[in-house]
Image: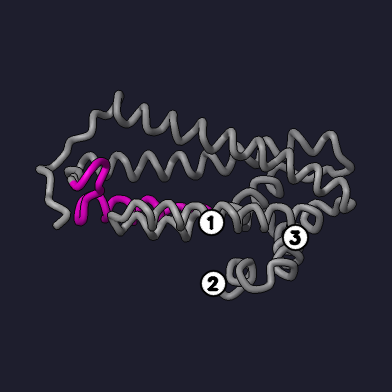
Amino acid sequence: MNSPLLKLFTHPADAWLDIRRAEEDHPQQYLPRLLALALIPAVCLFVGTTTFGWSLAAEERVRLSMGSAAQLAGLLYATTVVGVMLMGVMIRWMSRGFDAQPSLNQCIGFAAYCATPWFFAGVVGLVPIRWLAFAALLAASAYASVLLYGGLQTFLRLKKEQAMLFATCVWGVGLLLLVTMLVAMILFWFNGLMPEYVRPASLG
């Protein structure tokens, strides 16, 4: 963690310069980090749903069987990785309308680093508290937006005005992609994989 990842939370402007140089010297250097960080929400959700359970309504908490939790965690992991890559593809496609010609690898790398706050927010999957999960995801979304608006100009070497417009386009497309993929994942899990619940446990 010595590096761009830590700097994204302490000195984001410097972090984007480091990331840009690293991507130019070693394309796809973001990939191991993406594959590793995407495990955080998946593993935490697996532990949380099998050990503590989650309250979906009223005061009742339910847990998942090990098999169902593993399916959910695997599905979340795959959705996260594919989602980041698709976002990179969209950034590359949208860049044609601006004075930038980033490679696909650079665009996926940029999307992966912008998603870093969400990866770390996945830790709340361990704790069956809905308001905490909501607060963590809201904070992660806010900081991911900060990284997007603050880093696009540096990473793609755009003019300030172009960077703001481009970042707004990316933000809108990203929100649409996020909602679409999460809804698709949940529908597939409920209707295709048929989750198996363990007996309800009282929250008291």
Is 192 situated left or right of 143 in this image? Answer: left
| Amino acid at dot 1 | Ala
Amino acid under disc 3: Arg
What is the three-letter code of the residue carrying label 2?
Met
Instruction: Give how far across and how far down residue 150 sits, in percent.
Output: 74, 58
Residue at the spot of label 3: 20
**134 up-or-down from 83: above or below:** below
Q: State left or right for residue 152 relative to residue 41.
A: right
Q: Position of residue 3 (x, y in %)?
A: 62, 72
- Please give the residue where the numbered disc 2 appears in the rendered image: 1
Disc assigned to residue 74 = none
Which image quarter holds the N terminus?
bottom right
- Kindly indicate whether the residue at mark 3 contacts the one at mark 1 (C-beta within 8 angstroms): no
Disc 2 is placed on an element classified as loop
Q: Quadrant of the C terminus?
A: bottom left
Specify the farthest residue to the left.
199
Around disc 2, counting alpha carbons within 10 Å, would you say few (fewer than 14), some (14 to 19), or many (20 or more)? Answer: few
**Magenta extent:** 34-59
First in sequence: mark 1 vs mark 3: 3
> Is residue 135 in the magenta section?
no
Q: Quadrant of residue 128?
A: bottom left
Q: Residue at the spot x=37%, y=50% of the render?
A: 42
Q: CA distance from mark 3 to mark 2?
A: 17 Å
Residue farthest to the top, as pictured: 191
Read off the residue under disc 1.
Answer: 140
Q: Residue at x 31, y 55 (%)?
A: 129
Label 1 crowd (10 A; few <14 / some 14-19 / many >=20): many
